[in-house]
Amino acid sequence: MEYAKLGATGLEVSRVCVGCMSFGIKDRGNHAWTLEEEDSRPLIRQALDAGINFFDTANVYSDGTSEEIVGRALADFTRREDIVLATKVHGRMRPGPNGGGLSRKAIMTEIDNSLRRLGTDYVDLYQIHRWDAGTPVEETMEALHDVVKAGKARYIGASSMYAWQFSKAQYVAQAHGWTKFVSMQNHYNLLYREEEREMLPLCADQGVGVIPWSPLARGRLTREWDTVSARSQTDEFGKTLYQEGDRHIADAVAAVAAERDVPRAQVALAWLLRQPTVTAPIVGATKAQHLDDAVAAVDLRLTDEEAKRLEEHYAPHGIAGHA
Ligand SMILES: NC(=O)c1ccc[n+]([C@@H]2O[C@H](COP(=O)([O-])OP(=O)(O)OC[C@H]3O[C@@H](n4cnc5c(N)ncnc54)[C@H](OP(=O)(O)O)[C@@H]3O)[C@@H](O)[C@H]2O)c1
């Protein structure tokens, strides 16, 4: 496994991050396709054995059960100081007032709830899952700074939003001497490259590490376009993200993979890994082979000509993944 600094920090993370949205109790939350605990644990162990030290979850995944499963497995299989544990806040955890969002009250409540579920007294990376238009950004950034100063998070990061929003949050933090975001977890893959317009140049300029979500377009880059899986049938959010013309890009991935005699997932991840701002794609694995491919992708070096073939069919998309 290769390791890289997360953006301009001194924090060393594996170049593959395990996406823990795949782990959780099926009938809790919105992800009917998740692996239950007994099926999740072997994958977490396999990732650790492969040298992966970076794990991403969220309070909202499977109603908190992703955090519980991941916390128990990591406690059983490794040492806390050896891993980089990331979680998120913003999603609605309870009906009624203050059950979600990025108010000071919500953040202070949710960090403690996440730490309890994860069975740890700090997370390495505490991320805001989305922008909260209903809370002043000053309130959010000061609360996140206080979480860091209380020793409950080592670093803070952000996820999908407009570049102007991210820039505004960083400016507010800097102006007050508060902790700034070190990472951007955004929607970026061969089918969705709108981030190349504003967000990625901003991150490059500011030394922010980029850790893309759904790097395989939720499986679409790994198989024939019309193939359905248990996940693709029930993944309601995933159905909103891509468009019919994207199949030509998936075909290009298939062609390069066939020439290289490697699975398509390796080609799609290798393309992301060659982007200069990308620290580590967050891979959603539900089978051992998925992790094997992610690890192998770190060593697969695409040529410029191959990259051009993968990129040439791209057509602009409407913004997808901020909601
Ligand atoms: N910040 C955010 O808003 C946000 C949003 C989404 C996700 N995330 C994070 O990103 C992580 C990854 O998201 P994701 O699961 O959508 O990512 P993904 O890696 O694009 O998709 C994972 C799916 O791709 C298929 N797959 C993965 N590896 C494969 C391989 N080697 N060969 C064949 N098929 C393969 C599987 O689909 P099948 O199960 O259908 O076979 C798997 O469920 C999440 O766990 C979460 O941590 C964050």
Image (cartoon, rainbow, N blue to C red):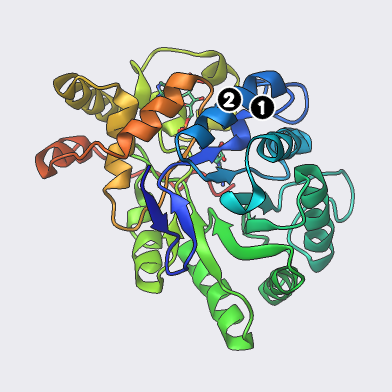
Q: What element carries label 2?
A: loop
Residue on which the image places disc 2:
235
Q: Position of residue 252 (x, y in %)?
A: 21, 27
Q: Residue at x 31, y 45 (%)?
A: 273
Query: Can residue 248 be seen from the camera position used here?
Result: yes
Q: Which of marks 1 and 2 is in front?
A: 1
Q: Position of residue 30 (x, y in %)?
A: 70, 29
Report the residue that reaches farthest toward the right: 96
Disc 2 marks which amino acid? Asp
Q: Is residue 303 above or below residue 266?
A: below
Assess whether mark 2 and mark 1 are in contact (beta carbons under 8 angstroms): yes
Question: Mark 2 CB in 8 Å range of ligand 1?
Answer: yes
Disc 1 marks which amino acid? His
Instruction: Classify 10 Å Cα crowding around label 1: few (below 14), some (14-19), many (20 and above).
Output: many
Badge count: 2
Q: Which of 114 and 94 is in front in this view?
A: 114
Residue on which the image places disc 1:
31
- Name the side, left or right, on which 13 lies relative to 200: right
Which disc is residue 310 wearing?
none
Q: Is mark 1 on a helix, strand or loop?
A: loop
Q: Which of 46 and 32 is in front in this view?
A: 46
- Name the side, left or right, on which 244 lies relative to 154: left
Q: Where is residue 35 in the image (x, y as percent from the top left)?
A: 64, 21
For residue 222, what is the image quadrant? Answer: top left
- Name the side, left or right, on which 256 lies relative to 33: left
Q: Residue at x 47, y 37 (%)?
A: 214
